[in-house]
Every structure is written in structure tokens, then in C-alpha cells.
Image (cartoon, rainbow, N blue to C red):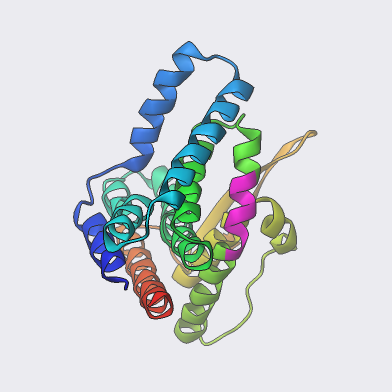
Amino acid sequence: MGIGYVLGCLLSIVIWKLDRQNLFYKINKFISKGLKSKLLLEILYTLITGIICYAVYIVKPGEIINFIIIFLVIDISNTEKKNLKQREKVKFYDTISTISRALVCGFIAPVMLILLAGNCFGLAYMIIYNLSIQDEQFYFLKYVFILLTIIPAVIAEVFLYIVYLCRNRKSEIDFKGDYLSNFLKRPLLNVDIMGAYVESVNFYYMYSSQKTDYLKSYGGYSKKIDNICVKDYLSITYGICIIVFILFYLLIK
């Protein structure tokens, strides 16, 4: 057992041009033309997700199903194309977030959910993740997404912290008092901050509140985010993905 997962993962990486987020964007854009209410859209998407996952649940488990599911849920290799194409200085500051999101949401989270709860949960996460980033007003989907992302984000942080310790020979990381609030509200931000410390670069995040918006900076402050930094962070995330998948394969057998 497990060969279907291996082959599906390899195919997902090989077909790196497949942009799942763009596919969900087109689907959402098409459906939104006929259904203007955000609430009704969320209800429709929730029902569709439930139907798809139930169909996967009742199908007899097998390597073909495993192959299809892992191919659909893993979305990591397209990140390299997106980030290495960005040459403008301003856009480079978005790359840390894009790579971290791909690591957590495109790999660790769906793989973890498949391991703990089965294929249908990994597939459900993939659908919820891609739908939640389409519109800020999908409140229910965003809440479920954040809830399901907390533990995978912590797993990514552990691996990044190990890299940080080995590379910098020091243990202090300053989250500026925001770790707990980020943990509950925006778990991916803590991963971004860890990534910035690993690469010794500045990372900026705009916090929004009812009264005002304010900018905070995190990181090591010793160099700028550039093409070399992006490639290095990508290589680290790929290394983490390999380790996570090996553990997944050993535990799923």
C-alpha cells in the first residue's frame, strides 16, 4: 500500500505547469456571474465539497484512488515558476508568503489530513483552501481553512526552526509579541516570519484594524530578498516536503 500516493506525488511535481488556483479562480468567476450572493455561493461550495468528498468516501479504497487524490491535493511545484518569474523588487517581498503557503497548504496540510483522517479530508482541504483565497467575504470557508491550517503551520515552523538553528547557531526569534494571535488568526504569518529569519531578510506585514492600518517588519535584516534568496528558500521547502512525504509513506503503509 502507498505506491499510488508515490506515483501521484511524482506526477503532481512533474506537471508543474498545472495552476490549480487559476482553475478555481475561473470556476468561481463563472459561477459568481449567475449567483451574486456570497452567502449562497458559500452554501453551494460547501454542498459541492461535501458531495465530492462523500463520493470519494464510499468508493472502495485502492491505489488508483490514492493516485488521483494525492495528485489533486499536492500543489507545490507550480510555486517555483511563479516566484522565479518575479523580478521587481516590490514583488519579491510576496515570495516568502507564496512559498510558505505552498509548503503548508499545498503539501503538509493535505498529506497530514490524508494520513490522519483519509483521502476525503485531504481532498476537502484542497477545495476549501483554493476557494477561501478567491474572495475575502467567504467567511465560513476562511474560518474552516484557518482552523485546519494551524497544526500543519506549526509542523512547518518546527522544520524551519531546525534549519534556523543549524544555519545561524542561535535560538532567538522575535515575533514581537504576535505569535499567539497569529497562531489563532493567521497561522501562515508565523511561517512567513520563520522563513524570513531562516533567510536573514526583512519581511513586512500590514495589519488591519477598525481604527487604523499599520506595518510591522520581522526577520534578520542582514540582506535583501533577491533571486538567490528565493531559490534557497524554495530548496529548503522542497527538502521539508521530501521529509514529510517519507514520514507519510512510512506511516501510511
Q: Is residue 97 magenta?
A: no
Location of residue 247 in the rendering, given as x and y in whole percent from the top left corner: 41, 78
Q: Taking 150 as reference, is 184 left or right?
A: right
Location of residue 104 in the rendering, given as x and y in whole percent from the top left corner: 48, 59
Q: Nearer the viewer, residue 40 or 147?
A: 40
Location of residue 93 in the rendering, given as x and y in whole percent from the top left corner: 45, 50
Q: Which residues are magenta?
A: 144-151
* Residue at image point 56% right, 56% down: 188
Quadrant in the picture for residue 13: bottom left
Magenta residues: mostly which secondary structure?
A: helix
Q: Nearer the viewer, residue 80 or 14?
A: 14
Q: Taking 169 as reference, is 239 left or right?
A: left
* Residue at image point 58% right, 29% down: 42
Q: Quadrant of the C terminus?
A: bottom left
* Residue at image point 64% right, 79% down: 172
Q: Nearer the viewer, residue 71 or 185?
A: 71
- Vertical arrangement, residue 240 with respect to residue 187, above or below: below
Q: Taking 15 as reference, is 183 left or right?
A: right
* Residue at image point 34% right, 50% down: 72
Location of residue 147 in the rendering, given as x and y in whole percent from the top left corner: 65, 53
Q: How many marks?
A: 0
Whether residue 133 appears in this view of the structure is: no
| Residue farthest toward the left in the current orientation of the protein | 14
- Vertical arrangement, residue 198 with respect to residue 54, above or below: below
